[in-house]
Amino acid sequence: MQKSEKVQQGVEAVRNALPAGFAPETGIILGTGMGALSAGLQEAVSIPYADIPAYPRSTVKSHAGRFVCGSWRGRRLVAQDGRCHLYEGYSPEEIVRGVRIMASLGVKTLLLTNAAGSLNPLFPTGSLMAITDQINFTGSSPLTGVADKPGQNRFADMSGPYDENLLRLAQKCALNMHLRLEQGVYLGLAGPQLESRAETRMFRAWGADAVGMSTVLEVIAARSLGLRVLAFSVLTNQNLPDRMAPVSLDEILEQTGQSAQSLRLLLDGVLAEMP
Ligand code: HPA
């Protein structure tokens, strides 16, 4: 099956499950341990990835595997509840297929969430960070082998992938909520091993504020399709090279759970006011 056929099959599977006339305008990708955010959707329709031909399934226990469509704050939304990662053995094309499906369904704005390690000594564990820019250190691209065609730019411009207006809106919402929202650069790598001290020191010197194993490929795919992008990291642990402590997935999940409520309120505010 061709790559574009797989996207098309995904589009049809989701569209067939939706009520007639429901066209999602905003997409959201829910990161590690954030599936509960989809509980905010009203009149939700759930489409398990298992019902979509050849759709990749997450092998991580903290990721569900489904699209959920519904309304949130009056906005028609499609949520990707559970994502796939390079470290599971999936290809960049499989990782971003959900983004391509959402774009084909008519989505114009993509919100992303993830769990990440803080590299910035001023961003403590539990902080929320709006991503202002990214470093793709995965060694791969979802645009490899992709042709330039109408609506899709192979040489995607990455000079400003995260939408300035949405970033300003997120800061305004956070301020209204008395919530501290950090801003910084996210570095995405393949994983799954966590970083060594020397790597951590290098990433910080490169200007990264947070490090994680997702998001950057999805954002590249979204930008190549012209979507507006806004993304948030929950900083579940702090990695400082001179006092590195081991981190476990359980600790990451527990910290995500603790910050999920603030993130949900922030998304609520952004969705309510987004132009
Ligand atoms: N490194 C990479 N990915 C992560 C981390 C980390 O420290 N924390 C949560 N996801």
Image: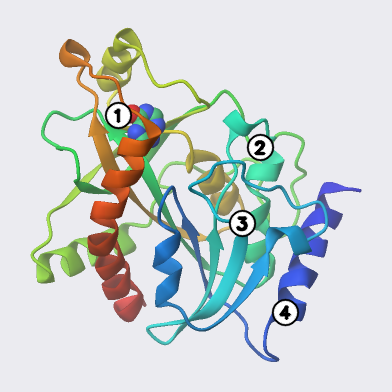
Residue wearing tag 2: 92
- Few, some or many residues within 10 Å of mark 4 (<14, 14–19, 20+): few
Of the residues under marks 1 and 4, which one precedes in the sequence?
4
Q: As drawn, is 267 to the left or to the right of 30?
A: left
Question: In the drawing, what numbered circle is on residue 65?
Answer: 3
Q: Residues within 10 Å of mark 3 (few under 14, many from 20)?
A: many
Image depth: mark 1 or mark 3 in front: 3
The mark closer to the camera, 2 or 3, is: 3
* Residue topped by disc 4: 17
- What's the CA distance linking mark 2 and mark 4? 26 Å
Judged from the image, the quadrant occupied by ligand 1 is top left
101 in relation to 275, above or below: above
- For the residues bearing labels 1 and 4, Cβ distance under 8 angstroms: no
Secondary structure beneath dot 3 equals loop
- Residue at figure coordinates x 55%, y 53% from the top left: 82
Which element type, helix, strand or loop, lies under badge 1? loop
- Mark 1–mark 3 Cα distance, whole angstroms, equals 30 Å
> Alpha carbon of mark 1 to alpha carbon of mark 4: how far?
41 Å
CA distance for labels 2 and 1: 22 Å
Which residue is disc 1 drawn over? Answer: 208
Taking the spot 67% from the left edge, 57% from the top edge, the residue there is 100
1 over 74 or under it: above or below: above
